[in-house]
Image (cartoon, rainbow, N blue to C red):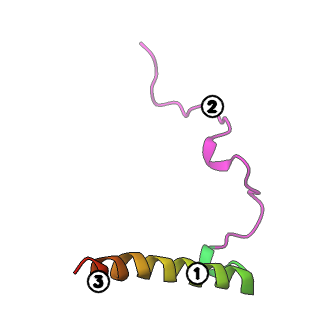
Amino acid sequence: MADDTEPAADHGSAADVGHDLEAERTTAPMSEYTARDVGIGIVVMLIGAVLAFGIPLLAL
């Protein structure tokens, strides 16, 4: 009978592929962004607002 209590072999997992495991952990709000990134976000927000509110108003 196999002994299932032994730990699995330490193989690389998909969770650490392409990541620097020694780097300090950061989250998205802490990441740096540029004025261009803000501009793109505003444009996306305006398009979403037009789709969410403009189209139903035109359908009246």
Going from the N terminus, do you reach mark 1 or mark 2 first?
2
Give the residue at the far left of this rendering: 60
- In the rendering, which numbered label is found on residue 57? 3
Secondary structure state at the residue bearing disc 1: helix
In the rendered image, the quadrant that contains the N terminus is: top left
Mark whose residue sits in front, 1 or 3: 3
Mark whose residue sits in front, 1 or 2: 1
| Residue beneath the point at 30% across and 80% down | 58
Residue 6 colored magenta? yes
Secondary structure state at the residue bearing disc 2: loop
Q: Main secondary structure of the magenta part?
A: loop
Q: Which residue is mark 1?
A: 43
- In the rendering, which numbered label is found on residue 9? 2
Along the line of sight, which residue is nearer the eye, 30 or 49?
49
Three-letter amino acid code at disc 3? Leu
Is residue 9 shown left or right of residue 58? right
- Badge 3, how many Cα within 10 Å: few under 14, some, many 20+? few
Quarter where residue 19 is shown: bottom right
Q: Is residue 4 above or below residue 19?
A: above
| Residue beneath the point at 42% across and 80% down | 50
Give the residue at the far top of this rendering: 1
- In the rendering, which numbered label is found on residue 19? none
Q: Is residue 60 above or below residue 25?
A: below
Three-letter amino acid code at disc 1? Val
Q: CA distance from mark 1 to mark 3?
A: 20 Å
